[in-house]
Amino acid sequence: MSTKKLHQVRHHILICEGKSCSAEGSDKVAKRIKETVKDLDREDEILITRTSCTEQCGKGPIVIVYPDGVWYREVSPKIGSRIVSEHICNGQVIENRLLVDLQENSEL
Ligand code: FES
């Protein structure tokens, strides 16, 4: 396992790999997210962590982006890739996969 230089980290992606999200394919999502981060040469500034259950079972796979505090639901490998390329790299949230409506601050 490598050691990330934390002073370079700008974004943290949490990928739920609890039982429910795993059953929905979170492993494939994690793989695609890692590939996209590598392809875009952002490995130094993006930290990826696989988590246990994030208490949103049935809405997964769940992916969370910090420091933005954006929670995504039903993330496919393709959406995972877009989270990296569009949200993190271009600041464009993937609106149709938000778990929480950022305007209303309520669950969709
Ligand atoms: S297993 Fe992912 S929210 Fe529970």
Image: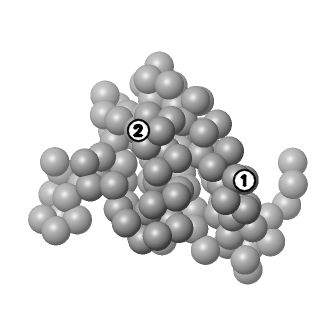
- Percent position of residue 2, x then y: 87, 54
Is residue 100 in view from this perspective? yes
Q: Is residue 27 left or right of residue 9?
A: left
Residue 23 position (above or below residue 37): above
Residue 103 position (above or below residue 23): below
Earlier in the chain: of badge 2 and badge 1, it is 1
Q: Is residue 30 left or right of residue 83?
A: right
On residue 55, which mark appears? Answer: none
- State the residue at coordinates (52%, 31%): 26
Mark 1, other Cα within 10 Å: few <14 / some 14–19 / many ≥20: few
- Percent position of residue 104, x then y: 12, 65
Q: What's the residue type where badge 1 is placed?
A: Lys
In front here: 50 or 44? Answer: 44
- State the residue at coordinates (44%, 34%): 76
Mark pair 2, 1: CA separation: 19 Å
Q: What's the residue type where badge 2 is placed?
A: Val
Residue 33 position (above or below residue 3): above
- Percent position of residue 45, x then y: 68, 69
In front here: 52 or 34? Answer: 34
Residue picked out by circle 2? 75
- State the residue at coordinates (49%, 44%): 80
Q: Is residue 43 left or right of residue 62?
A: right
Residue picked out by circle 1? 38
SS of the residue at dot 2?
loop
How are the colours assigned in the image?
Answer: one colour
- Hey, which residue is sitting farthest right in the picture? 2
In front here: 106 or 78? Answer: 78
